[in-house]
Image (tube, rainbow, N blue to C red):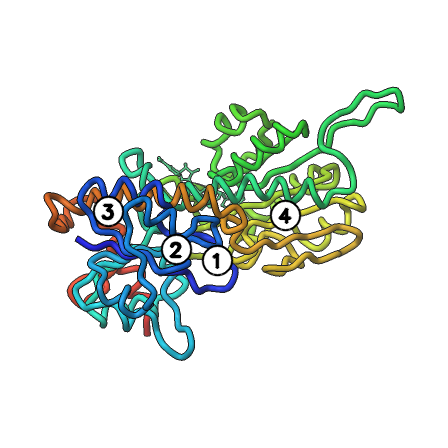
Amino acid sequence: MKIAVPREKEIGEMRVALVPDIVSRLTKKGFQVLVETGAGEAAHFHDQNYIDAGAEIITDTKQLWQEADILVKVAPPGEFDGEAEINSLRPGSILISFLDPLRNPENILKIAQRQITAFSMELIPRTSRAQSMDALSSQANIAGHKATLLAAAHLPRMFPMMTTAAGTIPPAKVLVLGAGVAGLQAIATARRLGAVVEAFDIRPTVKEEVQSVGAKFIDIPLQEETNAGGGYAKEVSNNTQEVIRQVLTEHIKKADVVITTAQVQGKKAPLLVTEDMIAQMKRGSVIVDLAAEQGGNCAHTEAGKDVQYHGVTIIGPVNLPASLPIDSSQMYSKNLQTLVQYLVKDGEIELNFDDDIIDSACVTHAGEIRNSRIKDLLP
Ligand code: NAD
């Protein structure tokens, strides 16, 4: 069975779907791995590393796509030089990638019409059984870590407390809003750098996790259900959001750094930090808005830009995992390897739709879109 790894063509995408170490494990299991020349270059993996791992290097992009039984990718297939990548994939073959299905249902329709069986890495269930395939978590960990480093690099003061002959410098105060995977990792990194950290999440169940990574949890009693199930948060009413904002205003005023990560699956990100709240922050403070690509948790966030407002720097990073491509590719590859080996039994692809992992992640099969949430988004 042939697994193909194309070169990612999306601007700014530095990751590669499979790193040589994982290629080597797959070839030892009997898979034939084809890698497009230069596919790992941006992540510092050279063609020779792939050859040493047992892969075959392919120079013709179309040939690579056409030969794939399973094509593994990072970014959703796109259109480059007027040609849709998906049209080079053989009907009946398998595509495994981030597909952004809820924001790009038209792309999913095209994949279905091309008779491709596609797995969307965003839709791997967030369960213990599927943990080793959970690419949202592996990449969110990296984004959370990098968000804190970005904040530290932009803050005009230090994170740790320092007692020196020249006086004592107090530690920076960091506030993390949204304590899912990225938020918890942002807290852990800020603590390692010596900051004092507070955090809030709409799901009170995360309080213990927040405390276990060394932050103080801000308790805000809420009058409505905030859990949507599966670990995800529900979109809350404007009233509840207003109650939250009122409490958070005091904490935001005191913070040197605010890192926001709040997201609600398939919806625009909730507004947690208003223009008025930013105006009350200390000059020189920094906000890193990890929800920038989903519309932002903060007024004035612009995806891909650093914005100054009232002396506060608001950073709206895009695709942070790609900025640490060695580790993000390594972790994503491991997620893919686990999924591929889960799907292939004795050299044959086995699609058991009674299995919740396969049922949830497989978005197209036999010419149809399988997921009703995606279907409902189409005209
Ligand atoms: P996410 O990226 O969807 O959201 C980030 C965080 O924002 C969430 O914790 C959410 O509760 C919070 N949020 C949403 N609206 C908010 C608001 N208005 N104010 C404040 N916070 C708000 O979440 P994620 O990091 O992808 O993970 C969600 C959860 O899934 C995890 O916390 C965990 O419970 C669960 N999970 C479980 C497993 C597993 O069991 N193996 C693996 C991964 C994740």
Using the image as rendered, state which of residue 374 and residue 67 is in the foreground: 67
Is there a contact, CB below 8 Å, between mark 2 and mark 1?
Answer: yes
The amino acid on which the numbered mark 4 sits, given as a three-letter code, is Val
Q: Which residue: 51% across, 57% down?
A: 294
Q: Give the numbered dot on residue 13.
A: 1
CA gap between label 4 and label 3 equals 35 Å
The amino acid on which the numbered mark 3 sits, given as a three-letter code, is Val
Residue, disc 2: 74
Q: Quadrant of residue 35?
A: bottom left
Residue, disc 3: 340
Q: Position of residue 65 (x, y in %)?
A: 27, 65
Using the image as rendered, state which of residue 50 and residue 239 is in the foreground: 50
Q: Position of residue 10 (x, y in %)?
A: 46, 64
CA gap between label 2 and label 1 equals 8 Å
Residue, disc 4: 288
Could you say whether the residue bearing mark 1 is in a helix, strand or loop?
loop
**Between disc 2 and disc 3, whose residue precedes?**
2
Could you say whether the residue bearing mark 4 is in a helix, strand or loop?
strand
Q: Position of residue 204 (x, y in %)?
A: 48, 33
Horizontally, residue 177 falls left or right of residue 156, namely: left
